[in-house]
Image (cartoon, rainbow, N blue to C red):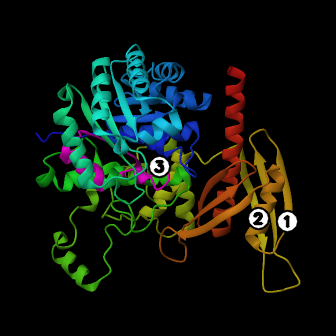
């Protein structure tokens, strides 16, 4: 049996804290369940001390997830560690990940501590964390720029204190494959007690080397990689989980290692994350981009038709990309839809399946053929939880070439509390009029930062997927909508943002009442 590298997924912590990737508690839980389905080894669910919302989110994931270790991040101080310990208490398997900076720059300018004080804080932090769990990870923040003799001293101290995993973060994405590989060879051979802990790498992509550096760390002796789906994270992002996992699987002959990840779920999990955050995956993104298994060159097409291995080093189905684009229609039943969902990498509850099936039938009535991409759009809307307090009851738009007549939008919305309100707006463009009408009804002023519409399948009756990024007075939000009507899809995307804002306000109100 091939030895396995542990996958420590930080999509919900390092990834979620990056601008543009924030998620609601329900969305984080949906992602955690998807990560559990992938069989990652550890889910870093958040930073418990950051806010009451983060604490409750970690706790909810710890209660829901059964087959994966749930982890909370904590600085090396009593308050952070105790908050993490309480947040992961319901977990079947819980971990506390505590850290302190060790590089000269951080010691002098951020912490204003000497070497001895940092060692004392590190050991005390690990000892306190051990009171909550036997699974304690310690990180030397900015490890790459830390002197090796001092790093050795810190590592030996936290091993004696009870750390079971030691992580070497390339916090600012500064290292190179040769350098980090050599670092891990040093640590795994020169640190006293090195064979009693798991060594971990956490690489950022500031120089575009996160995956290469992570693989080099594995070659040097690391047996855990910290990564995020779609490579999301601070600044340029983290090591992309799907890339490092498939590199190990595809080049098992070279690395002699693999992971426990169920790779067939990678594409579905990537799509879910994209839908939740509203951040589209670039077409040329390795493994999960739309072009990852597309061939347009005549020479390449000829080769692939003769033998797929001529230009494909992985099979699309290995990452959950279906090559059997079964066309469904209005006579297809729940079983066919559920089977298609499974092949596309989605697992839906009975309630979700029922909801998707109703939407599927409506779509099938509007289209002659329903393709995989259409089904994905429907399922993602359900999985993301697009339904909210506000819903569109009716929408009509008038526009044309008459310069004397401004485009007009008439919108009627209904609210879960029973309200039904209508507004007519005029603006320089039809979509501006639609967006303004919705904002007027909901009393939610927002500024449009980005708007795009893409066809998710071919043909005149293709389904449109609209995304918007908007700014309120305090924050940016992403919204998504899908429909065979482009205007309706766009309106749904705008309303998706408003529903996210209202759900968040309700959640924060409940948390404030609890505390």
Q: Which mark is residue 349?
A: none
**Disc 2 target residue:** 434
Q: Tell me where the magenta segment starts and ends, as one range.
A: 212-240
Residue plotted at (74% across, 40% down)? 416
Q: Which residue is mark 1?
A: 425
Badge 3 crowding class, 10 Å Cα cut-off, few under 14, some 14 to 19, many 20 or more, is many
Distance from label 1 to label 3 (Cα)?
Answer: 39 Å
Measured along the vertical axis of the image, is residue 416 above or below residue 304?
above
User: Of circles 1 and 3, which is in front?
Assistant: 3
Badge 2: few (under 14), some or many (20 or more) residues near its Cα, within 10 Å? many
Q: Relative to 203, is 129 above or below?
A: above
Tell me which corner region of the image, top left, top right, bottom left or bottom right, holds residue 199. Answer: top left
Which of marks 2 and 3 precedes in the sequence?
A: 3
Circle 2 SS class:
helix
Q: Locate residue 437, reporting x and y percent.
A: 81, 60
Q: Quadrant of the N terminus?
A: top left
Horizontal side of residue 127 vs 404, given as left or right? left
Direction from residue 156 to residue 344 in the image, left or right: right
């Amino acid at each position: 049996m091939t030895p396995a590298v542990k996958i420590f997924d930080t999509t919900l912590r390092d990834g979620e804290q990056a601008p543009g990737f924030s998620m609601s508690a329900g969305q984080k839980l949906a992602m955690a369940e998807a990560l559990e389905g992938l069989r990652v080894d550890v889910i870093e669910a958040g930073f418990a001390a950051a806010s009451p919302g983060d604490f409750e989110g970690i706790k909810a994931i710890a209660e829901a997830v059964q087959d994966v270790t749930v982890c909370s991040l904590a600085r090396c101080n009593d308050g952070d560690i105790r908050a993490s310990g309480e947040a992961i208490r319901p977990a079947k398997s819980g971990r506390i990940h505590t850290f302190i900076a060790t590089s000269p720059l951080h010691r002098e300018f951020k912490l204003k501590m000497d070497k001895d004080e940092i060692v004392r804080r590190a050991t005390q932090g690990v000892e306190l964390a051990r009171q909550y769990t036997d699974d304690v990870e310690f990180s030397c923040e900015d490890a790459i720029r830390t002197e090796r003799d001092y790093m050795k001293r810190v590592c030996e101290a936290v091993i004696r204190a009870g750390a079971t995993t030691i992580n070497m973060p390339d916090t600012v994405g500064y290292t190179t494959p040769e350098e980090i590989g050599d670092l891990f060879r040093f640590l795994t051979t020169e640190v006293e007690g090195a064979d009693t802990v798991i060594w971990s790498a956490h690489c950022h992509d500031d120089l575009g080397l996160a995956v290469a550096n992570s693989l080099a760390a594995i070659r040097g002796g690391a047996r855990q990689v910290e990564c995020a789906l779609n490579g999301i994270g601070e600044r340029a992002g983290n090591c992309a989980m799907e890339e490092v996992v498939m590199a190990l699987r595809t080049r098992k002959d070279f690395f002699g290692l693999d992971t426990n990840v169920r790779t067939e779920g990678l594409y579905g999990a990537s799509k879910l994350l994209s839908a939740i955050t509203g951040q589209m995956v670039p077409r040329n993104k390795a493994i999960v981009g739309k072009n990852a298994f597309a061939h347009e060159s005549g020479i390449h097409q000829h080769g692939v038709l003769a033998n797929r291995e001529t230009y494909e080093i992985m099979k699309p189905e290995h990452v959950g990309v279906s090559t059997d684009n079964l066309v469904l229609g209005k006579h297809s039943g729940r079983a066919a839809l559920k089977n298609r969902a499974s092949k596309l990498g989605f697992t839906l509850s009975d309630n979700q399946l029922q909801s998707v099936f109703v939407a599927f039938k409506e779509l099938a009535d509007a289209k002659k053929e329903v393709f995989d991409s259409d089904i994905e759009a429907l399922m993602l809307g359900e999985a993301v939880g697009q339904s909210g307090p506000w819903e569109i009851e009716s929408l009509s738009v008038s526009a044309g070439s008459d310069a004397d007549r401004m485009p007009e939008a008439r919108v009627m919305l209904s609210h879960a509390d029973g309200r039904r309100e209508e507004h007519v707006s005029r603006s320089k463009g039809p979509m501006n009029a639609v967006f303004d009408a919705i904002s007027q009804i909901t009393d939610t002023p927002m500024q449009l930062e980005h708007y795009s519409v893409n066809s998710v399948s071919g043909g005149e009756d293709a389904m449109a997927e609209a995304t918007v990024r908007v700014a309120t007075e305090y924050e940016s939000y992403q919204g998504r909508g899908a429909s065979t009507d482009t205007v309706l899809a766009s309106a749904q995307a705008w309303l998706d943002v408003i529903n996210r804002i209202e759900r968040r306000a309700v959640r924060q109100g409940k948390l404030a009442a609890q505390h």
